[in-house]
Image: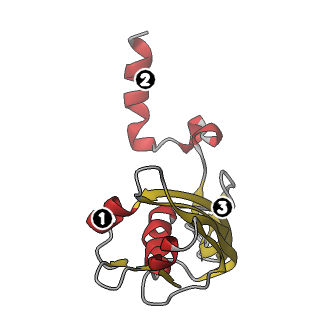
Amino acid sequence: MLIKLNELNYQKEINIDYEVFKNDDLDKRIIDLKNSRVVGRIYLNSNNDINIELNFRGTMIIKDSITLEDIPYDFSINIEENLESIEENYDNCYENIQNILDLKQLLWQNIVLEVPISYSINGDANLKGNGWELVNEDNKTVDSIDPRLKKLEDLLKGDD
């Protein structure tokens, strides 16, 4: 998605409406993108600076942190940038000589920031396995305390 910024010399703004697909080279945590679309505009402001306003939304397919199954994760990213900041922060997105903006690079550099470090559909669900059980703090009982630490509990009760 290369945008020729020279078109702004002839028209007030460039409208953007593209479907975005996964780029295998950029992030291995994202398995796929579904219904992903970027909508927005590139325009000249009153100071003749080039501004970019984009909304990138869709569903990324990522791995569940607990079960490692593929799960959907909805996202919506608003990008409001000035071309000068893009030149400084996104070196590989903007080619000043040809006056071309690579919208795909700009979008992927923003979506990588949106990928959650840990995400699970199960949330607080109790999980059990062969010889182990995962419970949250509310499900702990006195019997679940390690018997070797039982005497420490008696000492702590004495301080009350």
Q: Residue at x 44, y 57 (%)?
A: 81
Task: Say what secondary structure mark 3 lies in.
Answer: strand
Q: Position of residue 46 (x, y in %)?
A: 46, 49
Tell me where residue 31 sits by quadrant.
Answer: bottom right
In this orientation, does residue 117 appear? Answer: no
Left or right of residue 109, residue 11 in this image? right
Tell me where residue 101 sits by quadrant.
Answer: bottom left
How many residues crowd around disc 3 within 10 Å: few (fewer than 14), some, or many (20 or more)? few
Which of the two discs, 2 and 3, labels the residue nearer the N terminus? 3
Task: Say what secondary structure mark 1 lies in.
Answer: helix
Q: Residue at x 32, y 79 (%)?
A: 92
Kind of residue indicated by mark 2: Asp
Kind of residue indicated by mark 1: Asn
Look at mark 1 in the image and give the residue it sits on. 89
Which label lies toward us, 2 or 3? 3
Circle count: 3
Does the residue at mark 2 contact the one at mark 1 (Cβ under 8 Å)?
no
Look at mark 2 in the image and give the residue it sits on. 154
Could you tell me how far apart the alpha carbons at marks 2 and 3 are, in whole angstroms?
A: 30 Å
Q: Position of residue 89 (x, y in %)?
A: 30, 64
Q: Residue at x 67, y 55 (%)?
A: 126
Left or right of residue 68, residue 71 in this image? right
Q: Position of residue 152 (x, y in %)?
A: 37, 29
Look at mark 3 in the image and give the residue it sits on. 127
Task: Say what secondary structure mark 2 lies in.
Answer: helix
